Amino acid sequence: MRILLTNFHEGDGGGHTTYLMALSRRLCARHEIHVAAPPGSRLHREASSLDGVRVLAQPFPNGASKLLAGLRAGRQLRDYLRRHAFDIVHVNGSTDHRLVLSACRGLSHRPKIVFTKHNSKPAAGFTHRLRAKRTDLAIAVSDATLRELQATPYAACAPRTIRNGVDIAHYAPWPAEDALAERDRWCGRDDLLLGSNAGTAAHKGWMDLVEAMATLPAERRTRVHVLLCGKPPTAEQIARIAALGLAAQVHFAGLLSDVRPMIAAIDAGFVLSHAVETISFACREMMAMGKPVLVSDYAGLPENVDDGVDGWIVPVRDRDAIARTITGLLDARDRLPAMGAAARAKAERAFGLEHFVDATEAAYVALLPVAGASPAGSSGP
């Protein structure tokens, strides 16, 4: 198959970039893979380093103020689509979805359009109805996302769940002595270290955990530390943490090129999102490294965890429930290694890249009139 993967993010791209890089790495050995991403984006940079993957520096201007730039971008993309006669174009957000559909107008060969919904934002209204009519398949990354799609115009696009996968060989548990050495950077051996590599965006709910910590009795509160990676917190967040008396216990590791040392250091992870989230790569990465994870019951997060076995589930933004869970962790620290082993076992069973990539590839093939066939057409550079 000849496949074009698109993403509109100009910067890091977060989970979108992780998703598309996994597909690119695994599929390029057996299919012709192209990636269209804004120049300077992480996806453009990382995809360009992959042998066998062709990368187009493709802007995705958005908004009325960028009309001329949008017209230029559309012409460039239409020319690329015409030249390569793709079987599949896989879009990953409203902005690239919109430009791809516009660029497909007038093509003698129309590729099948696949759309993955990566967030919990509403997908209703007139523009979504228009896009859904010209989309062949909608992919949900969790069952919760699938239920949302089934209540939108994308119900007509044969929606199916294909959960995100992670590289469980890369995200493997560290030897205990190495993990302890990393842990010593942040807190004492007798402290409880909770952490998240899900980032510091407000909707990730990490401040809910900090606020919950502050309600604990002093003798318990002083035994809990939090470790986060991602963009620096805002001045308001820093001030609030200080006002709660927790400045010495909430640690920021910054933007990390490799989050594994940070994950190795923690006793348990958390992803307490209350907006945007779907399934969470971060949750699955922490579980693959043998860490039980505390999640909110938002969107697809509970689909990762068996409550009390390999993690915990609390109601969205319920700080009392979060505080009770932290208290339980302090009282049963000896259970955490077994729960971490259960998290790793689940990752090995269900979170691996092969499940994700094979299911996505099968979904592509099912759209084609002849499985695996490429249409006639030039595929020049």
Image: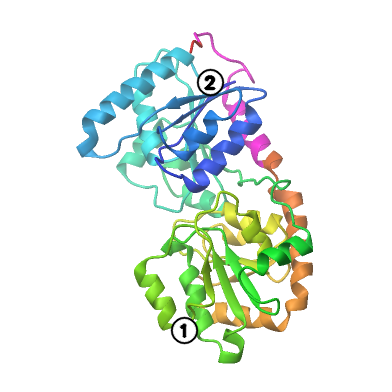
N-terminal-most mark, 2 or 1: 2
Q: Quadrant of the N terminus?
A: top right
User: Looking at the image, is 379 positioned above or below residue 214?
Assistant: above
- As drawn, is 144 to the left or to the right of 263? left
Q: CA distance from mark 2 to mark 1?
A: 57 Å
Q: Which image quarter: residue 260?
A: bottom right
User: Looking at the image, is 145 positioned above or below residue 247?
Assistant: above
Q: Which residue: 21% across, 38% down?
A: 64
Q: Which image quarter: residue 322?
A: bottom right
Question: Which residue does the numbered mark 1 point to in the structure image?
Answer: 245
Q: Nearer the viewer, residue 224 or 298?
A: 224
Q: Which residue: 26% across, 30% down?
A: 69
Q: Is residue 217 visible?
A: no
Which amino acid type is marked by label 2?
Answer: Asp
Question: Which residue does the numbered mark 2 point to in the structure image?
Answer: 87
Which amino acid type is marked by label 1?
Answer: Gly
Q: Which residues are magenta?
A: 356-378
- Decide: few, some or many residues near mark 2? Use Cα within 10 Å; few <14, some 14-19, many ≥20: many
> Is residue 155 part of the magenta span, yes or no?
no
**Image coords of residue 285 (percent x, y):** 64, 54
Disc 2 to disc 1: CB gap under 8 Å: no
In front: mark 2 or mark 1? 1
